[in-house]
């Protein structure tokens, strides 16, 4: 049984869930899919930047915020 973090939407096992939620303060990305294939486009909740792909979104959150 996995649980979803309300702030970053990451799926976690129950034993890690409480630890993660206590530390996690990132707002969830709003994602929009423009096409079925290709990377997802994320919109940053903090600055409304459009970012292609989850890995790039993570990098953006680390560097810009």
Image (cartoon, rainbow, N blue to C red):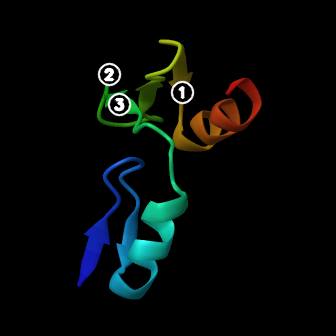
Q: Position of residue 61 (x, y in %)?
A: 63, 34
41 relative to 6 in the view: left or right: right
Pointer 1 or 2: first along the chain = 2
* Mark 1 touches mark 2? (CB < 8 Å): no
Residue at left 40%, top 74%? 18
Cα separation, mark 3 vs mark 1, equals: 10 Å
Residue matched to label 3: 31
User: Which of 6/56 is in front?
Assistant: 6
Query: Crowding at label 1, few (<14), some or many (≥20) Cα neighbours within 10 Å?
Result: some
Quarter of the rendering occupied by the N terminus: bottom left
Q: Position of residue 62 (x, y in %)?
A: 71, 38
Q: Residue 34: which disc?
A: 2
Tag 2, which secondary structure?
loop
Q: Nearer the viewer, mark 3 or mark 2?
A: 3
Vertically, is 51 above or below 54?
above
* Quadrant of the rendered image containing residue 41: top left
User: Which of 19/60 is in front?
Assistant: 19
Residue at left 49%, top 67%? 20
Residue matched to label 1: 52
* Mark 3 touches mark 2? (CB < 8 Å): no
Cα separation, mark 3 vs mark 2, equals: 10 Å
Pointer 3 or 1: first along the chain = 3
1 relative to 35 in the view: left or right: left
Tag 1, which secondary structure?
strand
Q: Position of residue 3 (x, y in %)?
A: 27, 71
* Mark 3 touches mark 1? (CB < 8 Å): no
Vertically, is 57 above or below 44?
below
| Residue closest to the far left | 1
Q: Residue 18: which disc?
A: none
């Amino acid at each position: 049984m996995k649980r979803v973090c309300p702030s970053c939407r990451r799926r976690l096992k129950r034993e890690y869930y409480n630890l993660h939620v206590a530390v996690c303060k990132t707002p969830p990305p709003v994602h929009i899919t423009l096409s079925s294939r290709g990377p997802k486009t994320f919109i940053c909740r903090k600055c409304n930047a459009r970012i292609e792909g989850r890995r790039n979104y993570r990098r953006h959150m680390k560097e810009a915020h």
